[in-house]
Image (cartoon, coloured by chain):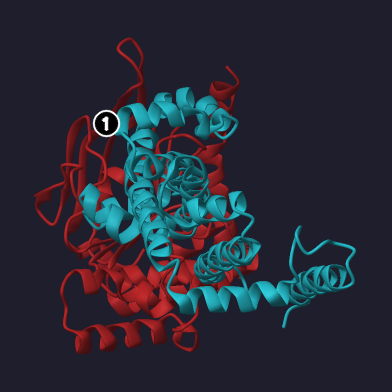
Chain colours: A cyan, B red
Amino acid sequence: MKPATTVRLGLITAIVLALEILTRIGVIARFVAPPPSEMMVGLWRLLLSGRVHLAITQTLSKIAIACSLAIVVGILMGVAIQRFRGLADAMSPFFTAYYAVPVYAFYPMMIAIFGIGEAPQIVIGFMLAVVAVVVNTINALDRIPRVLRKTAAVYGMRPLEAARRIYLPHAGPYLATGVKLAVSYSFIGVIGAEFIMSRIGIGHEIVFAYNNFENEIMYPLILFVLLVAGAVNGLFYAWEKRLLSRRSRS
Amino acid sequence: MNAMTIAAPVHVGLRGVTRVFETNARTKVEALGPVDLDLRKGEFFAVVGPSGCGKSTLFDIVAGLSPATKGQAIFEGSRLDGRAVPEGVGVVFQEDASFAWLNVADNVAFGIRRAGLGEAEIKRRVDDTLTLMGLRDFAAAYPAQLSGGMRQRVCIARTLVQRPRLILLDEPFGALDQQTRLIMGEELLKLWRETGATVLLITHALDEAAMLADRVGVMSARPGRIIDVVETPWGRDRDSRVVSDPRFGEITARLWMRLRGESMAALSHKAG
């Protein structure tokens, strides 16, 4: 195991252990947070009970839709914007400032446009994710060296074939960064939106449990969100690292 | 100059070729020409010239990557229109054009796999080419794991595997150190002998041109024209040891004397 991985795992273990000890000896009151071991057991029971299955399915479906849309639309927008240098330069400040805007502020407008339902939550997840894909697509395409464009011309490739055989494989690791961010932002966007405008979903279940002092449900669900987001992000991190490993000397 | 190349038929012919770039409606840059030049079948021809004289523009026209504004460029009897690289022409650029996401064997197989050759034939050709280029032990390696010289070998192998009859090299060793350049030069001569292809080498290194080529074309400052063609006395079996031949110094000196004024003109043009 690499030293950095050891340190990382050690840090997480230390935090969990500290929380376990502090909650067990009463420094942190149980109504504030239960011990992590009890959260794990609670999560296991909750999953076996089937009580939150629908909420989990709904939330993960909304995240999948928001994320997929953000990846497809983001890549297409990135390709279109990158083709016109002037447009890319003009848009650059907007992209930089984009994440300073609290997207949730638009939620009344979302409801007015899309109605009360799942759509506004998907749109917020999409809005948070799409710009990360656009920016990383532009960055990826900017990195394609001129000699590879000439090489595509040497092989007599049309633009689509050149994109499929040369440009996208070359840009793969940088596009992967956008995809990875899109997954994270979709999680944040959809679950965050569920807190404020949903009747079903993990976010809604967490808020409902909070309002009803159901710590035995709230904390296991928070743990569930952490575990799923961490696992998905870990998978994409490993994929990105695998792509990049071929580009670095070993 | 050996007798074989004198008797050989013309493989590439340039007649009054010019190239003008229009930067906007009012500004035109005359980049090249007019150039008249014949490359004989099977010969090794090098082009030297001052920086910015249009060497790469000439290269692009012969490669079929760019059209001539005026005049005609002919390869094997067919006109090069700048819309496509003709079958039988292989191109190697100065920059690293290896595909970082493919291993060496897949890099080399790229063009012939795309052309639809059978897997057995692809494997045979790739194995032969890797052996020829001394890359056999690196077939599974990725370009990032190789040195700059070896990556350039991969690019040359990717070109050779398609068995081109005309090989165009645009300063292929420009990014390499002097010792690697000499070794790569020797390897290039060996490949040239074994493939029998016609080679056009664009270079800014006079010693490289003098060592490798049967004939060296000297270009003027922009718009580049061929102002001299210097023939070398080396036989086909030459290698880098020709640098110790007293005539080598005479040839590079002649090249430099023809180029000196042009290089100074090019520099003053830039400064202006």
At 48% from the left and 57% from the top, the residue drawn is A202
Q: Secondary structure at mark 1?
A: strand
Q: Position of residue A166 (x, y in %)?
A: 34, 58
Residue closest to the far front: A212
Residue position for label 1: B18
Query: Image quadrant for the C terminus of chain A?
Result: bottom right
Q: Position of residue B131 (x, y in %)?
A: 40, 87
Q: Is residue B68 above or below residue A218?
A: above
Q: Quadrant of residue B162?
A: bottom left
Residue closest to the far top: B26
Q: Quadrant of residue A22?
A: bottom right
Q: Is residue A33 above or below residue B217?
A: below
| Res. B197 in view | yes
Other residues around mark 1 within 10 Å, as few (<14) / some (14–19) / many (≥20): many
Describe residue B140's horizontal placement relative to residue B8 as left or right. right
| Res. B168 in view | no
Count up the numbered dots.
Answer: 1
Between A62 and B133, the one lying in front of the other is A62
Between A98 and A112, the one lying in front of the other is A112
